[in-house]
Structures are given as C-alpha cells and as structure tokens.
Amino acid sequence: MVSADAPATDTPFAERFEAAWEVATDALPLAVVPLMSSLTSPDDVERALSSTGWHGGIAFGLPASPPDLWSFVSLPSRGPGLHVSPTLSLLPVVVAVQAALVAGLLGSVHQLLSTGTYDFVRNVKRYFVRVLGYQLLVFGVALAGVAIGAVAGPLLVLAIPGYFVLAYLFYAAPYLLVVEDLGVGAALARSYEWATAAGPYLSYAVGYAVFTAIVSVFVTVVAVNFGPVGILVGAVATAPLALALTVATTEFVADMAAAEREESGPGDAERRRESGWTDDRDDPNDGPDGSPR
C-alpha cells in the first residue's frame, strides 16, 4: 500500500521499481493482463515470426500505456512501403478488448496501492468508457499519421521522433484517468503541463526508457529468434516485469498528483469539486477503507 507520508516525486527510478516489484510479486494474478496483451497482438507476433536470420536490437520505451512483451522487443523492420495490417477488420474488437484490459489493470493497481485489495471486474466497469475514449483517440492519431505519410511520403521520416514526442508529453494521461478520476481532455492537459515543466516527470521517463532498453537487449533475442517458443517464454518472463512497471508508473503519477494538490492548497481542491471534478476515493460505492462494498 502507498505510504501516508508526503509524496516523494523525486524518488530515483531504481528505488521506485524495487518497491513496485514487491507489490507486483504479491499480486501476480494481475500479470495475466500483460501476458494476454502480449499473446493477442497478431501484428507483433507476425513480425517476430517473419524474421529471417539472426536478429538483435534495442527498444526505448516510455510509459504511454501499460507495457507487455512488445514493449521490450525491437521488432524486425517490415521494409519500405505502406503496410496494411491483415487484422485491420478486427480493429474495433481489438480496441475494445485492450480498453477493458487497461481499465481493469490500472484501476486494480491503483486500488491495490490505496487499499491493499482490488476488484478487477468492478474496475473494468468503472473505467472502461473513459479508457476506451482515450484508446480511440490514440488509434485515431496513429491512423491520421499513417494517412499523412501515405499522401506525403517524405513526412514518414518524422514518424519516429513524432511518436516519442507525443508519448513523452502524454504518458501520464491514461494513468490520470484512473488515479485522479479525470476525463480524457483533462488528463491530457494535466499530463502536458507536467511534461513541459520537466522535473520529476522527465526524470521518470528517462529512467523508464533506460530500464526498458537494457531489458530489451535480452528479450529481443529470445522473442524474435526462437519462434513461437521464444514468444511464449518472453511473454511469460516479462509479464511480472510489465506489472511492476505499471505499479511504479501508477504510484509515480499518484505522487505527482498528490504533490500538486499539496502545493495548490485546500482552496484549489474545493474549487475543483465545485466545478464537478471528482476523486475516485470518494466513490459512494466504496467502503470506509476505499474497497468496494
């Protein structure tokens, strides 16, 4: 559970991950979520299996969404040209399933840190709509980028730096949907404010990227070069790591929000409530300790 002490937004990433690992190992059933996400990503699986010859690489990840195996894998290049996913027709189903998994996972991790218990199904019901809205926005931006690249090919060179810029600016948004019970617009705005202020937000992103890069050197070799067995082994091995990273990021975002509330004072909190802002700790369906009734 989260300490009642003042939020420490400047905690080094390694120390934060170590604490998150302890929480994750006590809640391993939640690791099924990144495991399922890893094995139900047909495009990533297909790219890994299509590799010819020995492949190695490094992947720099940011916590823009809860991680899974593919967050630690540098996949082989598809080569030049525009590639259309063979599973494009299933996109609505994929988006809905991913939204349900993310809603349940983030809600459960936040509840676990706050109360020591969680109700996955209840959290899916509670956060699904707003997480779905966020996921649809992300996919919409991605599709728009692909369309622009198809029309103006030279702009494709901006895709990679553009992705990292957007991932950095808004990585806290999906966590804020749950931690602060915000809508999509408010979560994006808050994440952007933190990102442009740099400070702990930037430090955490750098620590996260370095960690995923180090792990990816080893995971890429296994997942890409050993066929279906390598993918399965990689998915199982990285599931607890992915859960620990989700715990670490959720707690970091909660600490950032708590520190912001302390700086703004009770008057600002009262104004937020009067304007309709709600905190999930005040859910009337929760018991006195924050757990579901």
Image (cartoon, helix red, strand yellow):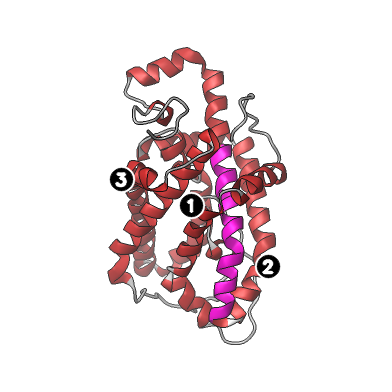
In the image, residue 228 sits, relative to residue 135, either above or below, namely below
Residue type for callout 3: Val
Q: Which one is earlier in the sequence, the residue at label 1 or at label 2?
A: 1
Find numbered disc 2 in the image and state the secondary structure of the residue it sits on. Answer: helix
Disc 1 + disc 3, Cβ < 8 Å: no
Taking the magenta stretch, the answer to whether it contains residue 137 is: no
How crowded is the residue under tag 1: few (<14 C-alpha within 10 Å), some, or many (20+)? many
Residue found 46% across the figure and 63% down from its top: 36
- Where's residue 195, x and y in %? 54, 39
In the image, residue 163 sits, relative to residue 80, either above or below, namely above
Q: Which one is earlier in the sequence, the residue at label 1 or at label 3?
A: 1
Residue on which the image places disc 3: 129
- Where's residue 115, x and y in %? 51, 34
Residue on which the image places disc 2: 217
State how far apart marks 1 and 3 are (Cα): 16 Å
Residue found 49% across the figure and 66% down from its top: 38
Q: Residue furthest top?
A: 267
Towards the viewer: 161 or 283: 283
For the image, the number of numbered tags is 3
State how far apart marks 1 and 2 are (Cα): 21 Å
> Which portion, as a residue range, is magenta?
228-252
Find numbered disc 3 in the image and state the secondary structure of the residue it sits on. Answer: helix
Q: Nearer the viewer, mark 2 or mark 3?
A: 3
Residue type for callout 2: Val
Residue found 45% across the figure and 30% down from its top: 290
The tag on residue 54 is: none
Indicate the quadrant where residue 226 lies.
Answer: bottom right
Q: Nearer the viewer, mark 1 or mark 3?
A: 3
Towards the viewer: 116 or 55: 116
Indicate the quadrant where residue 212 lies.
Answer: bottom right
